Image: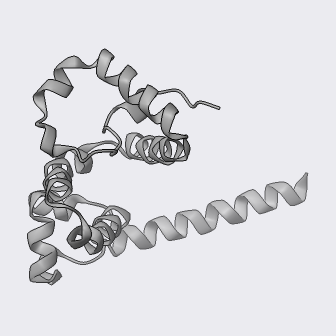
Amino acid sequence: MAARNALKAALLAVGLAAGSAWAHDPGPRWDALTAEQKTILAPAQKDWDNLSQLQRKRLLNAAKHYPSLTPAEQARFQARIPEWTHLPREQREMARKNFKQYHKLPPEKKEAVKSRWKADHPAATQAQPAAAAPAGAAPAAPVATAPASK
């Protein structure tokens, strides 16, 4: 029991130290980004200075993959940056978890999730042009609302 408490205390201390290090080094400033990164991440420019180091790192990593996306995927990516950067950390983590679960599903279960989401959110599916979501791509919100299937 004492060893477990000592381990918890050590992990907490390491976590706090890492957190304070991140607070002091938020990552690259907007001015330090390349011209290509600035173009790709332009929707996040006004919020960049308020993003955590982890958020900046993840956006920069996503920007590396941007050139390999289709034009529709690129438009979707840029349209969602402002919404994504304003989500609370817990909601971003839940979305990532649900995204991973969704992509592990077999194709027929993915279709069932998409169909159920479209039925529950008709306004959202009508508001988006068909070209905004590539065929076979996961819808943005169903993953956050769909329970894990086994």
Image position, residue 108 (x, y; %) = 50, 33
Residue at (49%, 39%) from the top-left corner?
Answer: 107
Q: Nearer the viewer, residue 22 or 99?
A: 99
Image position, residue 115 (x, y; %) = 37, 24
Q: Nearer the viewer, residue 71 or 91?
A: 71
User: Looking at the image, what colour scheme do you see?
Assistant: one colour
**Number of marks in picture:** 0
Picture quarter containing residue 43? Answer: bottom left
Q: Is residue 62 above or below residue 111?
A: below
Residue at (53%, 43%) from the top-left corner?
Answer: 101
Q: Is 120 displayed left or right of 109 in the figure?
A: left
Q: Is 31 displayed left or right of 20 in the figure?
A: left
Q: Nearer the viewer, residue 65 or 3?
A: 65
Residue at (29%, 42%) from the top-left corner?
Answer: 87
Task: Locate the C terminus and report the quarter of the image it occupies.
Answer: top right
Picture quarter containing residue 41? Answer: bottom left
- Residue furthest to the right: 1
Image position, residue 124 (x, y; %) = 19, 26
Q: Is 8 displayed left or right of 101 in the figure?
A: right
Q: Is residue 33 above or below residue 128?
A: below
Q: Is residue 48 above or below residue 139?
A: below
Image position, residue 48 (x, y; %) = 18, 63
Residue at (33%, 46%) from the top-left corner?
Answer: 137
Q: Is 42 displayed left or right of 102 in the figure?
A: left
Picture quarter containing residue 23? Answer: bottom left
